[in-house]
Image (cartoon, rainbow, N blue to C red):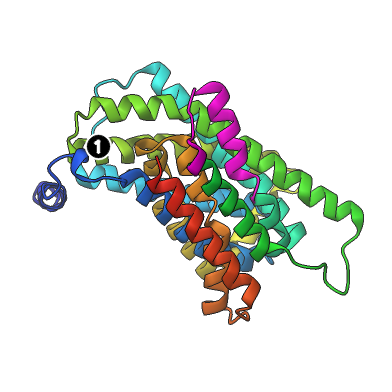
Amino acid sequence: MKREERDYRMTFSSLTSRVHSMQHLPYLGEICALLAPAAWSLAVILFRQAGFTVPPTTLNVFKNTLGLTLYWATILALGIEAPALAGGPEYGILLASGVIGMALSDTLFFMSLNRLGAGLQAIVTTTYAPTIIFLSIIFLDERLGPWQWLGVALIVAAVLVVAWVKPEAKARTRRVLWAGIGLGLGAILLQAVSVIVVKPLLNALTASTAGDARVALEALVWATCWRLLGGTVVSWLQCAWSPRARQALRALGRRRAWPTMVGGSLIGTYFSLLLWMGGFMWAEASVASALNQTVTLFTFVLAALILHEPVTRRRLAGLGLGLAGVGLVTLAG
């Protein structure tokens, strides 16, 4: 076992040694912030399929538990240790951010997705970047330049163009529609709060690595794992206290849903979450959130490729607007 652990460490070291310093990786945070929604959009398609047979609380418990298991396995395999600045307050911040963003927010997100469907839910998701930018300006004293603001506007316009769909012939009742919108807005607000809570700590972690890529990556994995721990514990409590707790847990026995649940959890909770945290660790929250907003664009592209949905002029126009906005937000800083 010790030999295997040493081999894991040597492999990890050989990969990270190729990167001499974080200063040699310009736009690293922006790259992570773009890759995260690409991964998450694929996970959303899988979660949407699983959501037809698995309740939101159960789905959230499953994805958080599997993701946490994978992160702990990564930490043990690579011998990752806590950063030097880790203390009680730091652990508390990560746990609190996870509770807000991984347990409460994600549960509301799945509830909204079940009520609205992917198209209408995507419209609600357009409030993600503006909400985080607004809170970042108030609480983190971040600023965007005029060209970056234009980029944000283009991204929001793009996702509105591609996501705006007419209600189906069998229209949902107004009550269900507004309930889905309210749940979606609540999920976005909680996610934004979780970002604002953890962003100063991520800044401190970045500063403490002194440009060492290996230390920075280890700090990122460590922070992501502890944030996910908070979300996992509370998601289990949510499921246990649910009036239909037994029924919700029995849904885990439906084997037909396991491929989509496992795939969505691996892509959306392990890879996407790590990239998402990296985006906020190495870029300003306002910039990272604007780039995260492209999740709708990625979702529609994947829907065309995987689900064979039609590619219309409107969607192509939206994709062009989104790419232009991404360029302005990323390069005009």
- Residue 81 vs 292, above or below: the answer is above
Residue at 59 percent across and 48 percent down: it is 153
Where is residue 216 shown, x and y percent of the image? Answer: 25, 37
Residue at 32 percent across and 41 percent down: it is 221
Residue 144 covered by magenta stretch: yes
Q: Amino acid at mark 1?
A: Ala
Q: What secondary structure do most residues of the magenta stretch adopt?
A: helix
State which quarter of the image contains the C terminus.
top left
Horizontally, residue 253 falls left or right of residue 141, namely right
Numbered marks: total? 1
**Outermost residue to the top:** 88
Where is residue 256 shown, x and y percent of the image? Answer: 58, 73
Q: Which residues are magenta?
A: 126-147
Q: Which residue is mark 1?
A: 216
- Residue 189 vs 153, above or below: the answer is above
- Residue 296 vs 282, above or below: the answer is below
Residue at 82 percent across and 67 percent down: it is 167
Residue 207 covered by magenta stretch: no
Residue nearest the viewer, comparing 45 with 162: 162
Horizontally, residue 215 falls left or right of residue 41, namely left
Where is residue 204 shown, x and y percent of the image? Answer: 33, 24
Residue at 62 percent across and 79 percent down: it is 309
Q: Is residue 93 visible?
A: yes
**Outermost residue to the front:** 146
